[in-house]
Amino acid sequence: MGNNAMRSNFELLAPGGDIESIKAAIVAGADAIYCGLDNFNARNRATNIIFEDLNGIVRVAHQRDCKIFLTLNIMILESEIPAVIRLLNKLVNTKIDGVILQDLGLFHLIKQHFPTLDVHASTQVNSHNEGQILFMGQLNASRVNLSRELNIKEIKQLAQFGHQHNVLMEVFVHGSYCIGFSGLCYISSAKNGNSGNRGRCSQPCRDQYQTTAVGKDYPLNMKDNSAFSNLEALADAGVYSLKVEGRIKKSHYVYTVVDNWSRQLENYCTQKPLLADTRELYTVFNRDFSNSYLMGDINKAMFIDNPRDNSVDHFAQIAEAKSETEIQAVKRKLYDDKTTIIQTVEERIADLDISLLALELTIIGQVEQPLIIRVTTPLQQFEVASTSILRQSDNTVLDSDCFEKRFRSLNNGEYLLAPMDVSQLATGVVVPFKELTYMRDQIACVLNGDQPLVEPFELPKAVRKPLAAMMPRLSVLIANPADIEAVSQPDTAVYYQLPEAMTMEGLKLVSLFQENPHLIPWFPAILLGDNYQAAVTFLDQVKPSRLVTNNSGVGYAAHQLGLAWIAGPQMNISNSLSLECLQQEFGCVGAFISNEIKRSQIKPIVAPAGFELYYSIYHPMMLLMSRQCLFHQTIGCKKKRFDDKCLRKCDKSASIINLTEASFVVDKQRGDHNALYNPENFLNLDIVAEIKDKFTGFMVDLRDIKTDTQVTVSKAELTALFNQYLAGDELAGDELAGDELARNELTRSEIEAVVIGHTCNQYTKGL
């Protein structure tokens, strides 16, 4: 008993990309499985499952004490809201154990209208500080998947904090590492419109690049994560769910990894020695293993210059196989071992049947008796009776057609209704038809585990009030005190970016803002540990009249302090429900719309009354941000590992070029993490001409990020040009004479001429 109770302190959470993998995870000992339907989930390349299979999967899993969580973890577009509501109306009447989400609008929708669904925050939310856990807790998340980059000390602090606030922590313990922070990676999106935030990541980080200065061909390719030897530390930290990555992996991979982890957990809970033999883990796909993020040792040994399966290399090294014959023998053994695993999985899952259950209804009744319906399924038999008695009738009478029509809805994806048996029903009899509806609902309730079915919810049509005509203001983002004077122009808001290493110069920053009260602080997306606490202290000391944040934890703190805050572009806002969520739940006054979406996806978004909308029309395009050092693999770095000192002090730049000649800029600013940028800056003047009436303001980012884009005028002149363009466009239309219209086009041409090398690809392609 004690040991089982102990096992219940943990959950081993397995991936299920298709039916075979889900079954493999069940027989291998998973406590829970996360899987996606064929839409709205962040693993578009997995086979995924169709809704018709879901109930059977849940039934088979539950018979073996295994939970099923459904991934709906992508950004939702406005046009998809009706479809996602139709799906939720079906899911709420299944026995799934929870849904995993990224989109704030979806959290809000479920909290308000589907409160019986348990919700979890996806890795795509990128949770890494206490404020984010409080933010997610307020949206009813019962658990949060922590950022993969955290070390055990950081995890422990958040897990203890979560326990105090009723939120459980989930940590990835096995499978792929991403080079970039999840949810903040736009490399695949910018390259070909396949956004990681839509489950379509094409993994350009695994691509081959032109050989770098330090001789690497795969400079962004990391080894796989394995915390197999760190179970005691994770248990001590108070982590509840141990998550295995791999929804695009095959069933023999899932079976092997889950089986090994399940046995490891069993040994821990029964106080037996922990397993140290990793041969089976190395037999199935791997890129070699590392636990360096967990150990807080961010070093260059975490990279591997081979994105493919490392199994042969690993076993060849152990066997000291050098010759072709010896290597062939290693390959043959590996092939045989994998074949054995595949056969084992096939045998073990053979009797797991997810097909629909037969549902038989026998209709029984005589005059002056209640109507009785006997319900038989392979799992149970029960009867329901009418409250009124049957009476003779010459008009409408009960016949098989009438029952077929009334009870057809019991064919709900879990049961298959057999033709009804009416042989024990007297002819020419009737009960009030509303009795039949009531009896059907009673049957549905019993079949649903004695849970009454939830009535479908319909979203009321948004009433579009005509917007008061306003001139969108220009705002400028800078990160250098020397630029303050140059860009401070009438009617221009100045955002000042704070560093990710907030503890670095907290006091200096406070005095900078006190001396320049017109500056609006711009908070980065990543604020780890003490740096988050320093951000909260800064807010408390400066109490800015407004702020922009790309980190929801800062948004939460701002709301607690009663400060007006705006959600930044990296909060990935792409629908009206998210805006409503930000305003109603967190007192947010405005938001940037994601730069990943195109005109037709932006147009239908409706802001709530009094809510401001912003959009960045010019910026260096950050494609990913990493806690790793990106210089180890590119131009080299004499430091062996990336630490707090690197974060605070390092400032350098390099570039990498892939085999299709596309180049990327690797950039590290003092106080910030390493980042990868598009060579050309983003410039979108079309949106001003096309849908400017939707926006309160447009932003231009004039920070000193060294991309290939060349700007031939000063920051003051560029700011003036953008201001001129916005003002001219505001006047454009009927009241403008042809020459003034031409003058506005001239301003546009001037901007395009002085910003040499720019792209508007994301706005053209969208999600």
Image: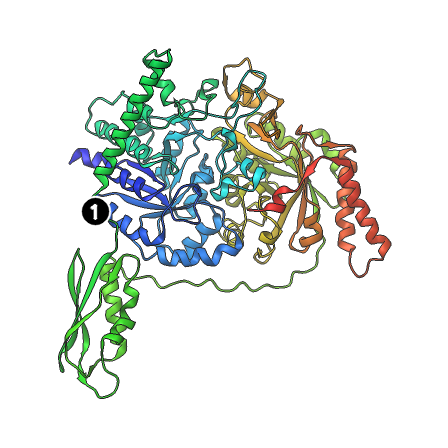
Could you tell whether 471 is left or right of 342 in the image? right
Vertical order, 411 against 330 (above or below): below
Residue 127, percent across and down? 45, 37
Residue 107, percent across and down? 44, 50
> What SS does tag 1 mark?
helix
Could you tell whether 222 is left or right of 397 in the image? right
Using the rendered view, name the quadrant where residue 478 is placed: top right
Vertical order, 476 against 106 (above or below): above
Residue 87, percent across and down? 40, 56
In the rendered image, is residue 489 in sight? no
Q: Residue at x 27, y 51 (%)?
A: 56
Q: Residues within 10 Å of mark 1 (few under 14, many from 20)?
A: few
Residue, far bottom: 394
Instruction: Give the residue type that dot 1 points to.
Output: Gln
Instruction: Count all numbered tags in the image, as a single digit.
Output: 1
Residue, far right: 739
In the rendered image, is residue 162 in sight? yes
Give the residue number, with chain letter if any, for mark 1: 63
Q: What is the image's colouring?
A: rainbow
Residue nearer the viewer, 367 or 118: 367
Vertical order, 458 against 17 (above or below): below
Could you tell whether 314 is left or right of 728 in the image? left
Residue, far front: 325
Residue 271, percent across and down? 20, 25
Using the rendered view, name the quadrant where residue 428 is placed: bottom left
Residue nearer the viewer, 268 or 140: 268
| Image quarter in which the N terminus is found | top left
Q: Residue at x 78, y 55 (%)?
A: 731
